[in-house]
């Protein structure tokens, strides 16, 4: 499962190898590796260099903190994420700091930073599984996230590995790699829904 | 300018080397490279595997198409982007296809795909400069982007290079690499605004 998928065009192995497991090994993530993941996120570009992305992190060893963070996930995600060594919440700031006007790129730039984090993780043999299935308002309350900030994602980080405790339905889902639309379905030119000549 | 920035923690060179130039060389981008950039975006993860990201592309050789795409940028961005070999618009689909409910990750997942595209570009010696300064409704009209989709970003792609035609103010901005907040400002634990122990 750590081999690359067959892509239509050659891409870097750290992109083609990346996938989102449900089954994580119990092996903890070194603090030095975690720091590098956030450092990678730090250097992502952002509109007006706002750097709107924030993270709340908990490692499995910090039992209480981990439980608290886990409780911000919807139950189907808790079923597998409870076994993960590191959990984080991804938060974004909605307005620009320089003029307090809405930042249209707020969610986008959190995603962009996640892209960097994912890539750095893959380069270190780590796997990441992001979730949109969270309870944002519960997280706001539990952590005191102020108005003007939005909790968007949860991020599971660890090493992929067989987990005997994983529910059967997730073990099955684990086996299948999700397909992708062909380029001609989403790379257009001239007008909407007209495949660019290069992808025809 | 193609060397890595001094990061606080070691990260992959394709992340630390990445930056967003204003000055692009006239050298065109090979179609085969462009395809790999979109292929990289294609393999980004997305909530419910929705793959909400779409692109509208124009290369400099397609004069009319390029002008049309350029006209969707705000003027300060047109000042430098007119010299770029490839421009694209990044579009996202707002609702999930499987249930037509709002996708909270729509903008996030466009950003995540952009992260892959950026990384693949850097690995090929290309530079990318993304812009939030666009005219989304003009783009919607010109390209017939349907309701339910949102034009979010413009993406300039090419090789970095001296551009004598670039306005002086941009030449100056070019020289400075933008600083980043320290990790302790955005990696929290336990409660909002409390730096995680690992980043202290």
Image: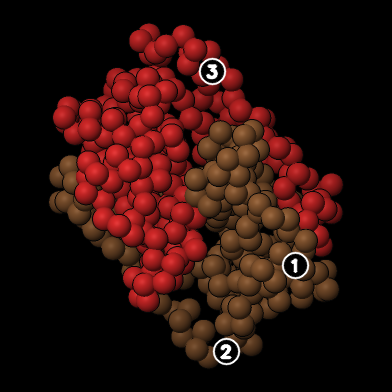
Chain colours: A brown, B red
Q: Are marks 1 and 2 in contact (CB under 8 Å)?
A: no
Report whether B194 appears left or right of B62: right
Query: Does residue A7 lie above or below B199 as drawn?
Result: below
- Residue at disc 3, secondary structure: helix
Q: Are marks 3 and 1 on the same chain?
A: no
Give the structural element (helix, strand or loop) at label 1: helix
> Visible in this render: residue B82?
yes
Q: Alpha carbon of mark 3 to alpha carbon of mark 1: how far?
A: 41 Å
Most foreground residue, B168 or A59: B168
Left or right of B123: which side holds B137? left
Subunit ID for the residue under disc 3:
B
Judging by the rendered image, the residue that carries numbered circle 3 is B173
**Residue under pointer 2:** A167
- Viewer can see residue B35: no
B34 or A140: nearer the viewer: A140
Q: From the image, tell me which residue sits under label 1.
A: A141
Give the Cα separation between the discs numbered 3 and 2.
54 Å
């Amino acid at each position: 499962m750590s081999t690359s998928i067959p892509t239509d065009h050659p891409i870097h192995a750290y992109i083609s190898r990346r996938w989102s497991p449900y089954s994580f090994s119990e092996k903890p993530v070194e603090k030095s590796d975690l720091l590098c993941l956030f450092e990678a996120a730090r250097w992502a570009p952002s509109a007006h260099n706002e750097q709107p992305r924030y993270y709340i992190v908990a490692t499995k060893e910090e039992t209480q903190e981990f439980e608290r963070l886990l409780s911000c996930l919807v139950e189907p995600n808790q079923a597998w994420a409870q076994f993960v060594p590191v959990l984080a919440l991804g938060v974004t700031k909605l307005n620009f700091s320089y003029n307090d006007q809405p930042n249209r790129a707020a969610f986008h730039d959190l995603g962009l930073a996640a892209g960097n984090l994912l890539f750095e993780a893959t380069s270190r043999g780590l796997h990441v599984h992001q979730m949109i299935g969270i309870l944002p308002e519960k997280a706001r309350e539990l952590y005191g996230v102020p108005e003007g900030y939005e909790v968007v994602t949860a991020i599971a980080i660890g090493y992929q590995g067989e987990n005997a405790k994983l529910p059967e339905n997730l073990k099955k889902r684990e086996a299948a790699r999700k397909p992708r639309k062909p380029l001609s379905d989403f790379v257009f030119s001239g007008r909407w829904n007209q495949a660019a000549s290069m992808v025809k």
